[in-house]
Amino acid sequence: MAYKVLTDAQVEHFIERGWVKLEQAFAEEDALAAQDFVWRQLSLRNIRKDDPSTWTQPLVHIKENYASEEFNRCNTQRFQDAIEDLIGLDRWALKGFMVMWGWWPVNFAEGSDIPWDVPTTGWHYDGSHFHHRVNSREQGLLCIPLFSNIKPQGGGTLVAEGTHHIVANVLNEYPDGLPHKDAIRKSVEAHPWLAELTGAAPASGENRVEKFMNNAYRDPAGFELRVVETMGRPGDVMLCHPFLFHARSQNHLRIPRFMCNRTTPLKEPMNLNRANPADYSPLERSIRYSIDHYSKAGV
């Protein structure tokens, strides 16, 4: 299959790992201009870019969406084409429309006062606003655009690679779907690695960075599970599977971290039983791949 932006290797990484980084989805200068727009919103809260003494809160969550000229420039053709590489041509509900950019958990120094570690809390996959089915149209992709330079231990999103397979298999067992909280709970209960990661099962006593990040766990279906710290430059975007578990991380660098959350709703529910296999999008193919592997493994 020919892709407009992503390589075959990147698409396979998305299917297997549940995410892929698109470098410079939009220009760094436009990302920094958008960051300045958010700083102006922070200044309304008496938090000023040029005065670190006003950065008194470890994390400031601006629960707003924006569509200013700065953000419009970030909605590049490259970004849009990469989205369609994964969800399928002309299947994006917002194609050609103005998109909103939000919400904004601006991380100044969250968790900087304690040793850096893999958290037990905060793990989730998105979608609190809809009922979840294995073919839901409401999410499509989770896009995480970066508007600041994010280095190791600088507050980048933690993604639990491979967990999208677990969620797909669980949702496949409920044709009528599940409320979001129930889908998360049942996914956690379905897998011991995910249960321990999220604190739902007793800890083994091992160092969590060593266990969950430095070593991959291969589950009975053959999928590798590992926590990865995402990093990048302003203008990069993490394109994530809608079922991927992720969480915030600590910002030990104390450099303000700017990123937001963009959903990618589909025009219609995914079709996981297409007559022509060539018509499957990579997103649909990933879900079929998850279900088929767990079925063959008998788990």
Image: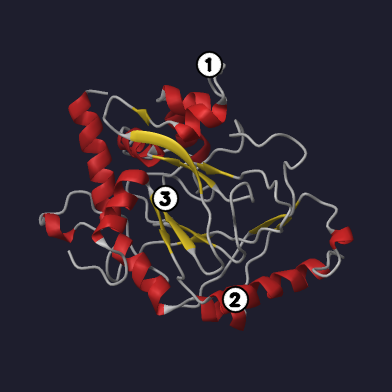
Q: Quadrant of residue 47?
A: bottom right
Mark closest to the chain's N terminus, 1 or 2: 2
Relative horizontal placement of residue 229, taking residue 173 as reference (left or right) = right
Whether residue 19 can be seen here = yes
Mark 2 or mark 3, which is nearer the start of the sequence?
Answer: 2
| Quarter of the figure that contains the N terminus | bottom left
Residue at 43% x, 36% y is 226
Of the residues shown, which amino acid type is indicated by label 1? Answer: Ser
Instruction: Depth check: give the residue in front, 24 or 77.
Output: 24
Tag 3: Cα neighbours inside 10 Å, few (<14), some, or many (≥20)? many
Q: Secondary structure at mark 2?
A: loop
What residue does disc 2 label? 67
- Kindly report which numbered mark, 1 or 3, lies closer to the viewer in this rendering: 1
Q: Which residue is mark 3?
A: 242
Counting from the top left corner in percent of width and height, residue 62 is at 71, 60
Task: Give the residue drawn at x 34%, y 38%.
Answer: 165
In contact (CB < 8 Å): disc 3 and disc 2:
no
Give the residue at mark 1.
204
Residue 16 drawn above or below residue 234: above
